Amino acid sequence: LAKTTQPISMDSYEGQEVNITCSHNNIATNDYITWYQQFPSQGPRFIIQGYKTKVTNEVASLFIPADRKSSTLSLPRVSLSDTAVYYCLVGDEPISSGSARQLTFGSGTQLTVLP
Amino acid sequence: GAGVSQSPSNKVTEKGKDVELRCDPISGHTALYWYRQSLGQGLEFLIYFQGNSAPDKSGLPSDRFSAERTGGSVSTLTIQRTQQEDSAVYLCASSFAGGNSPLHFGNGTRLTVT
């Protein structure tokens, strides 16, 4: 299983750019990197997914170095409403392996945006 | 379109009773997952369905836990003889099969065993 390591918590101020890094040293060739956001009393919500280099959507950017042993979620100009837990998930489509255990979420990073 | 729907949203039960939790996935999603989240913790994988079959039940914590999926759609997670340590939020997610499709989660069922 590709175990992930993230900071437990981060604080930021409104309007700043926030970068959350996830380490996944034993990522496998077929593994994708997916980030989710979770607000209290809600299920996680998909933010962004990538395999290598850089991916950008309307919400965030994802930077993945060539060795793919880490990834960085970048949130531009955060607001108070971005306060949430952010999860990095590394895994392969379970159909190819039969096991979904590798779709295992780590403890996540609690991001607190301050006014 | 409708997202993943879970019911009930809250359930309080007495220790020793059986409970049944329901998940209605997004139409067309063939993969379905159950996770458990204890207060302030990450998500613990329970079981995965592809269609009606469950190729991976490895996360079920004990034989008191079982799950089924019928018609490739609705799934139920049953906990027999509930214990206080079963108290948690039970989350269901669904996705398309293939291509590392992102998981779409419901808002969970908060189970409290008294």
Image (cartoon, helix red, strand yellow):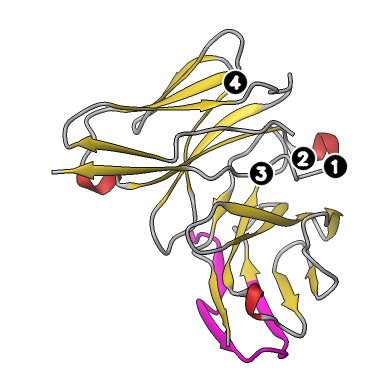
Q: Which residue is mark 4?
A: A51
What residue type is disc 2 on?
Pro
**Do callouts 1 and 4 point to residues on the same chain?**
yes
Q: Residue at x 30, y 47 (%)?
A: A83
Q: Chain of mark 1?
A: A
Quarter of the figure with residue B17: bottom right
Residue B108 within the magenta-colored segment of the rendering: no
Q: Chain of mark 3?
A: A
User: Which numbered disc, 3 or 1, marks the residue closer to the eye?
Assistant: 3
Residue A94, which numbered label? 2
**Do callouts 3 and 4 point to residues on the same chain?**
yes
Residue A59: x and y in percent read: 34, 33
Measured along the vertical axis of the image, is residue B31 above or below residue A76?
Answer: below
* Callouts 1 and 4 close, C-beta under 8 Å: no
Quadrant of the image for the C terminus of chain B?
Answer: bottom right
Q: Residue at x 21, y 41 (%)?
A: A79
Question: Earlier along the polypeptide chain: callout 1 or callout 4?
Answer: 4
Give how far apart the Cα atoms at labels 3 and 4 are.
Answer: 17 Å
Q: Along the horizontal axis of the image, is A37 left or right of B13?
A: left
Residue B51: x and y in percent read: 80, 56
Residue A98, which numbered label? 1
Q: Chain of mark 4?
A: A
Measured along the vertical axis of the image, is residue B110 above or below residue A84?
Answer: below
Magenta stretch: give its range.
B1-22
Measured along the vertical axis of the image, is residue B82 above or below residue B58?
Answer: below
What residue type is disc 3 on?
Thr
* Callouts 3 and 2 close, C-beta under 8 Å: no
Give how far apart the Cα atoms at labels 1 and 4 are.
Answer: 21 Å
Give how far apart the Cα atoms at labels 2 and 1 are.
Answer: 5 Å
Question: Earlier along the polypeptide chain: callout 3 or callout 4?
Answer: 4
What residue type is disc 1 on?
Gly
Q: Residue at x 58, y 7 (%)?
A: A66
